[in-house]
């Protein structure tokens, strides 16, 4: 069995969810892996981020999001409102706030509970079949990395692992 690993570094914008379409990078990794039949795992270890497969909406809103991305954000705003004030959510508690401070994050950066909850709903990985050496996303599927943390811009890492014959 062959295995292949590649990492992608992305930059989030901060102050709103950031969506990156990474379909091309995933397809390129599959080509480098030289696997005819197998699976591709696209994963992030960041607990405020998600990896999802969705249709490309093409049309964009004034802030640059595809319509479907804006719709997703709007739905999340209804069920998991953006954290705007201390005490809006139980998380972060005083011990986590102190732990975060010791590790370089100020109080504003810890007010990202909404991002953690949104990531929990969508998940942090996708498993995609590889058939005939190509990633099988169907006719309309695209791979997206989403950073839901709006507290500030930062670099994020996406892992691609491919296994098969």
Image (cartoon, helix red, strand yellow):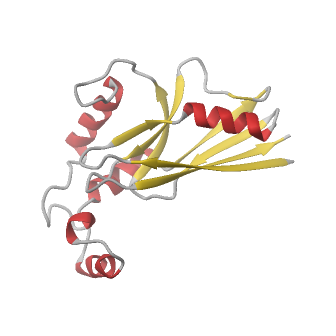
Residue drawn 29% across the image and 49% down it: 14
Where does residue 153 sit, x and y in percent of width and height? 32, 53
Please tell me whether residue 65 is drawn above or below residue 79 in the rendered image.
Answer: above
Q: Quadrant of residue 79?
A: top left
Number of numbered discs:
0
The answer to whether 129 appears left or right of 142 in the picture is right
Please tell me whether residue 9 is drawn above or below residue 113 in the rendered image.
Answer: above
Where does residue 101 sit, x and y in percent of width and height? 28, 78
Residue drawn 86% across the image and 40% down it: 165
Please tell me whether residue 85 is drawn above or below residue 162 in the rendered image.
Answer: below
The answer to whether 118 appears left or right of 75 in the picture is right
Where does residue 84 sit, x and y in percent of width and height? 14, 55
Residue placed most toward the observer, 1 or 33: 33
Where does residue 94 sit, x and y in percent of width and height? 23, 80
Please tell me whether residue 78 is drawn above or below residue 150 in the rendered image.
Answer: above
The answer to whether 94 appears left or right of 154 in the picture is left
Residue drawn 31% across the image and 24% down it: 67
The answer to whether 6 appears left or right of 23 in the picture is right
Residue drawn 41% across the image and 48% down it: 11
Q: Quadrant of residue 76?
A: top left
């Amino acid at each position: 069995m062959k295995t292949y690993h590649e990492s992608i570094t992305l930059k989030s914008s901060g102050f709103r969810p950031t969506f990156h379409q990474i379909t091309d990078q995933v397809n390129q990794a599959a080509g480098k892996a030289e696997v005819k039949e197998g699976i591709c795992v696209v994963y992030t270890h960041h607990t405020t981020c998600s990896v999802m497969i969705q249709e490309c909406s093409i049309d964009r809103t004034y802030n640059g999001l595809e319509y479907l991305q804006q719709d997703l954000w709007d739905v999340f705003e209804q069920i998991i409102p953006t954290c705007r004030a201390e005490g809006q959510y139980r998380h972060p508690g005083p011990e986590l706030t102190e732990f975060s401070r010791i590790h370089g994050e100020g109080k504003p950066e810890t007010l990202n509970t909404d991002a953690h909850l949104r990531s929990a709903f969508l998940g942090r990985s996708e498993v995609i079949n590889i058939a005939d050496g190509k990633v099988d996303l169907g006719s309309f599927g695209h791979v997206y990395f989403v950073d839901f943390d709006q507290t500030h811009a930062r670099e994020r890492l996406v892992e691609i692992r491919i296994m098969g014959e």
